[in-house]
Amino acid sequence: METMMSVLVGILVTVATYLILSKSLLRVILGTAIMSHAVHLLIMIMGGFSRDSSAPLLGEEAASYTDALPQALILTAIVISFGVTAFFLVLAYRTYKELKTDDLTKLRGHDDNE
């Protein structure tokens, strides 16, 4: 299970890197969102998968507990990444409305030294 999830994380990181390196501002934002989900999956893999452990809310008599720290980190990271992605989308929309382009090379402007 961990191997399959690791391959999925690798695919997501590859796709996200390709999108981040593109010229379109919307693709860069989509790439950062995909990268954040890849990191969430990576944290979940590092937490480990166990079918025989139970939730820590069942009491002190349970034989083994599932560590709740990865789930708490992922939940917090999901909320933060949604907020940051929404902010980036609004910023990109505002930039497109003002400058009529989302091409990053055109948004960079002209260098005075050339």
Image (tube, helix red, strand yellow):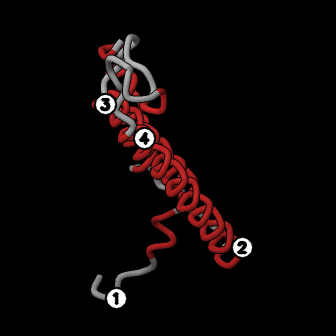
At mark 1, the secondary structure is loop
Residue at the spot of label 4: 16
Label 3 vs label 2: CA separation?
43 Å
Nearer the camera: disc 2 or disc 4: 4
* Rendered image: mark on residue 47: 3
Q: Earlier in the sequence, mark 3 or mark 2?
A: 3
Q: Position of residue 61 (x, y in %)?
A: 38, 22
Q: Nearer the viewer, residue 56 or 41?
A: 56
Q: Position of residue 62 (x, y in %)?
A: 38, 20
The residue under the point 48% across, 41% down is: 34
Q: Earlier in the sequence, mark 2 or mark 4?
A: 4
At mark 2, the secondary structure is helix
The residue under the point 40% across, 47% down is: 73
Q: Earlier in the sequence, mark 2 or mark 1?
A: 2
Q: Which amino acid type is marked by label 1?
A: Asp
**For mark 2, does the 10 Å Cα neighbourhood hold few (<14), some (14 to 19), or many (20 or more) residues?**
few
Residue at the spot of label 2: 97
Quarter of the picture holding the C terminus: bottom left
Nearer the camera: disc 3 or disc 1: 3
**For mark 4, does the 10 Å Cα neighbourhood hold few (<14), some (14 to 19), or many (20 or more) residues?**
many
Q: Which amino acid type is marked by label 4?
A: Ala
* Rendered image: mark on residue 112: 1
